[in-house]
Each structure stands twice: as structure tokens, then as C-alpha cells.
Image: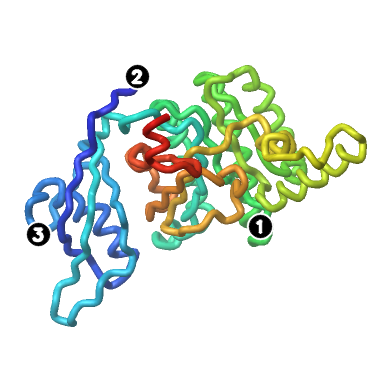
Amino acid sequence: MRTAHSASTVSTGIAKVDRSSTEGANQEISTLAISALKKAPQRTSLDALPLHPSEQSFFIKPFKSDLPKQPHSAPPYIFLTVITVNSTQSPKGRPPKHVAIIMDGNGRWAKERGLPRIEGHRRGAEAVKRTLKAAQENGVEIITLYAFSVENWNRPKVEVDALMSLLDRFLVDQLPVLIKRKIRLRVVGRYKELPEYIQHRLRKSEAATAQFTEHTLALALNYGARTEVVDAVKAIAQAAQAGSIDPNTLDYDSLRPYLYTNDLPDPDLVIRTSGEARLSNFLLLQAAYAEIYFTSVLWPDFDESHFKAALADYASRERRYGKTAEQLQVS
């Protein structure tokens, strides 16, 4: 059961960070400076204090990756606005029904630790399990994960083969979990171009969970938004030629049945990890009015606190759909 809190705690201040690299600044901000702001928000110059993640989760709005230049002898500082969310509570307001996630940063996570890239992907699979659990516990009905794009075939064959093997193992291990927690598995993308054994595993998993309606895990596999549009246009052209659709009456609602996501609502929130700020050919049509949340956390490190931070940020936004704030207040 979710417990909504009345308001997030907002603190501002100047925190000392490591200017040697954006990555170093991000790490120090996310693990030390935020704790200092939490414990002493009234101060203007803050020393880092120990962080206790079990107590609270944090996010920065906005995160400034380009730190201000300082004289060589001057200490580096960055201005932060910090919103804290108690880890035992969910953000105020109705949670997004559908959250889509671009899981980025597995390779960088592994490289930073001197590990092979596939280890980053393996740890990323653990983050998937944590996120799926957090979504269900926080009232999110649908999670769509960008698992493998049409462009990912351009990666080295050894990595692609390892990713397929990892996907196969994930499906074997998680199918009993999905059934126990009554989560439907849904695949979006050209998955008939995936290896035959993966197709078999996906079909089996989809069939075994097809009866569940309250929660859905959608895996975007061999997915690309441009490919999706091309496939939809081809299908519409064939339908028009057969006389089953009038192209002159076509609108988005009548286009939706031809998309890979035809039985899913459009995402309310898109999350991208690792600090990159682009959609990378992911749900470009469906995400037209989605709120977008970028976090510098690498995907293997993503956990419930980061997911709840994204939900808190979503809850703080006003979704207008082209209307004015005054119109929303009237309605």
C-alpha cells in the first residue's frame, strides 16, 4: 500500500565538488554533498557528511554538469537544489500509469571498474529486477524497457551473442517471478528477427502471462521508433488498398492499432539513465507528451530510491497537453 507524503523537502546551498571531471563531480554530489545539504541546509559552505541511503533518497534539480570555472587556488563549488523524499513513502499525487526507461550506462559502469562489458549488462539485469519491483510497489502499472534497439546489431558479434544469452537466462529466471506477481510480459519490436531460441522463449513467456491485466512489463527488443513508423505506414497502405481503411480519415487514434504498442497506453514518463539527454529512437510517437527525466546514475546502480526520485519529479510537474495553466485550473 502506498503512503503519500504532504510535500517534499527542498534545500538549497553551495556544495564543494571534485572539478577534475564531470563524472567525479556527479559521484561526489550524489553521495556526499546531498547528505550535507540534508543535514545542514541553512549553511552556505558545506563539508561532505556520511550518507545513509536507507534513510532518504535524493535528486538534484537541476543538475549542472558544466561546473563554473574557478581561480586555480579557489575551491570548486556548485549550486544545488535538492529535493528529499523519504524512502518509505511514495511521491505525492497519482503515479504515472506507464513509465518507459532507456537503460543506459552498462558499458561505462563496467569500464570504470575494469570489467568486461557483459558484466555491466549482467548487473544491469539486476537493476531491471529492482526497478520492476519498485514500479509495482509504487503503483506504476506498465514498465517499458528499451532492451535492444535495431541499431544494437552494429555492436561486436560477441557482445550481441552475449546479450541474447543474458536475455534468455533472464526470461528463464524471471518467468516464475512474473507469474507469481501477476505481471504480463509484452514484447514490442521486430522480435521475429531475433534468434529462434529467443523467439521461442519470448512466445512461451508471453503466453504464460497473457491472462494478467493489472501490471505489464514490456520489453522493446529489436525496436526502433523509425522502424515502427515505417512498418505502420506499410500496414496502413495495405489496409487502404484492401479497402478496410480510408487514408483521408486517418488520425493518431486510428494509427495507433498499427504501432507495436497498439494495446498499451502512451508513456506518461520516460526515464533515461547515465547522464545522456536524448531519446535514441525510442517511442518517439508515443512519448510526444511524456514527461522526460534524465539522471546521471548509470543503469547498473539504478535502484528504488532513484526510481522514486523520478516519480517525485513527475509529481511536481504540470501536464498541460497544449492548454494553459488557467485552463487546467478551471477544468
At a point 43% along the width and 40% down the height, the residue shown is 319
Residue 112 lies, in percent from the top left, at 40, 62
Query: Mark 1, residues whose alpha carbon is within 10 Å: few (<14), some, or many (≥20)?
Result: few
Q: Split into 4 quadrants, where in the image is the C terminus? A: top left
Q: Do the residues labelled 3 and 2 touch (CB within 8 Å)?
A: no
Helix, strand or loop at disc 1?
helix
Query: Disc 2 marks which residue?
Result: 1
- Seen in the image, is 125 located left or right of residue 153? left
Question: CA gap, disc 3 to disc 2?
Answer: 39 Å
Q: Earlier in the sequence, mark 3 or mark 2?
A: 2
Looking at the picture, tell me which residue is in the foreground, 298 or 45.
Answer: 45
Helix, strand or loop at disc 3?
loop
Residue 232 lies, in percent from the top left, at 76, 43
- Check disc 1 and give the amino acid type: Glu
Q: Which of marks 1 and 3 is in front?
A: 3
Q: Which of marks 1 and 3 is nearer the N terminus?
A: 3
- Seen in the image, is 32 located left or right of residue 254? left
User: In this picture, is 247 found above or below 280?
Assistant: above
At a point 39% along the width and 26% down the height, the residue shown is 137
Q: Earlier in the sequence, mark 1 or mark 2?
A: 2
Query: Disc 1 marks which residue?
Result: 151
The answer to whether any part of residue 123 appears in the image is no
- Check disc 2 and give the amino acid type: Met
The answer to whether any part of residue 229 appears in the image is yes
Question: CA gap, disc 1 to disc 2?
Answer: 40 Å
Residue 177 lies, in percent from the top left, at 52, 25
The numbered disc on residue 44 is 3
Query: Mark 3, residues whose alpha carbon is within 10 Å: few (<14), some, or many (≥20)?
Result: few
- Check disc 3 and give the amino acid type: Thr
Query: Mark 2, residues whose alpha carbon is within 10 Å: few (<14), some, or many (≥20)?
Result: few
Q: Which of marks 1 and 2 is in front?
A: 2
